[in-house]
Amino acid sequence: MSSKHPLNAKAFVANDERMHWHDKALWFVREKRDITSKTIPEWEQLREYANSIKTHTMANLDKYLVEFEKNAQARGIEVHWAKDAKEHNEIVYNILKENNAKKIVKSKSMLTEECHLNPYLIEKGIEVVDTDLGERIVQLRNEPPSHVVLPAIHLKKQDVSDTFHEHLGTQEGNYDPTYLTRAARASLRENFLNADAGITGVNFAIANTGGFVVCTNEGNADMGANTPKLHIACMGIEKIIPRLEDLSVFTRLLARSATGQAVTAYTSHFHGPVVGGKMHIVIVDNLRSPFLKSEKYQKALNCIRCGACMNTCPIFRRSGGHSYEYVIPGPIGSSLATFRDPKKHKTLSFACTLCGSCSNVCPVKIDLDAQLYNHRQDLTQQGIIDSKKKFMLKSASWLMSHPTLFDLAGKVARKVVPLLPKSMLYTKSNVWGKNRDLPQMPKNSFKELYKKGIEDDK
Amino acid sequence: MKIGLFIPCFMNELYPDVCVATYKLLKNLNIDIDYPMSQTCCGQPMANSGCSKDIETLAKQFVETFKDYDYIVAPSGSCVAMVKDHYGVFFKDDADYNKVKTSIYEVCEFLHDVIKIDKFDVSFPHKVGLHNSCHGHRMLKLATPSELNIPYDSKLKNLLSLVKDIELVTLQREDECCGFGGTFSVTEEDISIAMGKDRIKDHLDSHAQIITGADMSCLMHMDGIINRNNENIKVMHIVEILAGVEK
Ligand code: SF4
């Protein structure tokens, strides 16, 4: 699957009503984020702290990972290392096999999405149920999540109702959100009670305690981690923070940035297996360590997956998360995807007006718009952008480096364009003019007026 | 104090009236202003499209053209941001570039921060919506972006409030992008148009008669959509209002 953002966006925009509904839903979250972030006078300072802690951690990642491993092991947690998605999936599968676990409840984890864990396990005959409500909805529809915090934000309640009717046997045409939520909850209860193992993600892993924290609003991670005797937590290497004291900086920023809540409803600390049970943690690299070496894109690893950059992004709001064709969509996803596979994702860094709003909302101050600007330069250097476009831009640069020629070209255009019939001006190749009128051509350029003497001109 | 006027390439060709208004606005304040003839373009469209390497000559030419002025002033926030933020790669600790970088101003920023203007002798009895163009807004900090938790200020609003009889309307989304974005307007045409329409609608819903702003490129994009759809609203560059141009 190649990434074709403009085409996917076209399809999303074509349904004007749905596009505006999506835009408004996300803007509503962005406004909630604004209101709650403004109740904290030290908000900008918190962002700065978060940035510093993360930057420090990434510079000493090896040290903190080893510290974490040692402390986690001391708490009876088994620690595994995976270099890529394949190893990650195999490790998880082997743990499940050793424990004879056939039914799994899983809470939200973008990492397992990235590793395609679900299809892998399902193919091995294991039943996997996503237990976050939004994740469950997209799982039943066989779709990927479209947003890191609001995985089913692209769907309306009618879509959810139809999906539940088909898979959970709810009443057809009953769109009542409470009714639908109850139906989902009843079905999920069954899954929790019968599960052999729970898989969760990790929001923060604390090096000096060897424990980790999972944030949810539904408590589903707690159910999944505590009901069965086996808990497997999966995390990318970047989830480490050095000390317990650092945690509050992030928990204060995370929920407010994500949904405008003061805290997530459940901020659960895991520091060892349940009585008589087992706890495993799988630490995954999967193309993360190259970021550490890259000066320009290193900061992308600081992301805490709050989704704020998606909510604020005017392009995301109007094109939907699926248009990015990458597990993490929006500004941060565009940077991650382009760094990892520039050829495949070459349109993503251009799916952006460089408005800069994402960098301002980002709680850990990732320089998102600068990264996307840099990606564009890198794609050109690597010869990945369209050669026709490159030629045009090169020619334009050359022309502009020759003032007299440039002035002449402008003069000719100003003389010729007004004489052209509309049918010649508004052609297929004039994309600008498809849905926009061209500006009126003035008689003279400013330069010409200036030469004549502006004062006498009027 | 000698001011070098920088006129962005497309404004020179397409919007001479706005350029004249800028020139006169400064001239009428008794500012010693000069328009160097050898200027062309800051290179922004190329750089934002991934060809920043190709604009090295342009960047050097720009610095050569403007290095001897006390201030460089331009009626375009995004072009000023380009010079400030993206020329650095071509100049390693270069005294001329460092001077240009610190002495280039968007025209409103210049009037507000350097001249510290406190009155305009003009009246503009219309309802006006202010479009905060992203580059000037967030990079040059012409106003406080709605995302940040810092004290609010808006240089453009401060200047407009000096104009008599003007009524600034309140928009639903104060600093939403209009979707121009240079070549974005062509490569992502559908989203660009959708964004432009939404931006215009916000102004129409707020009963604005005029959309103004400090970036002609955003205004050109919205004007194109307005004219295509025969919307009952006009665009005007902010200097036209400040210079007392009637519409
Ligand atoms: S890049 Fe920043 S704003 Fe975007 S998801 Fe990550 S932490 Fe949140």
Image (cartoon, coloured by chain):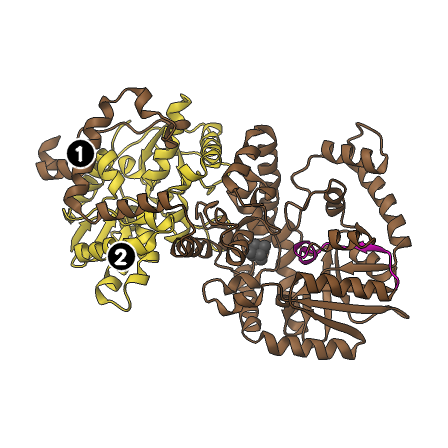
Chain colours: A brown, B yellow
Pointers 1 and 2 in contact (C-beta within 8 Å)? no
Q: Quadrant of residue A120?
A: bottom right
Which three-letter amino acid code belongs to the residue tagged 2?
A: Glu
Q: Residue at x 80, y 41 (%)?
A: A181
Q: How many marks?
A: 2
The residue pinned by badge 1 equals: A411
Q: Residues within 10 Å of mark 1 (few under 14, many from 20)?
A: some
In space, the residues marked 1 and 2 are separated at their CA atoms by 25 Å
- Region in magenta: A100-115
Residue B28 visible: no
Residue A300 in the magenta stretch? The answer is no
Q: Quadrant of ligand 1?
A: bottom right
Using the image as rendered, state which of residue A424 and residue A123 is in the foreground.
A123
Which three-letter amino acid code belongs to the residue tagged 1?
A: Lys
The residue pinned by badge 2 equals: B56
**Image position, residue A308 (x, y; %):** 58, 51
Q: Is residue B194 left or right of residue B159?
A: right
**Image position, residue A258 (x, y; %):** 63, 52
Using the image as rendered, state which of residue B24 and residue A227 is in the foreground.
A227
Q: Residues within 10 Å of mark 2 (few under 14, many from 20)?
A: some
Residue A340 visible: yes
**Marks 1/2 same chain:** no
Name the image quarter holding the N terminus of chain A. Answer: top right
Subunit of label 2: B
Q: Secondary structure at mark 1?
A: helix
**Image position, residue B17 (x, y; %):** 22, 33
Per the rendering, the mark at residue A429 is none
Q: Is residue A326 left or right of residue A127?
A: left
Residue A104 in the magenta stretch? The answer is yes
Q: Secondary structure at mark 2?
A: helix
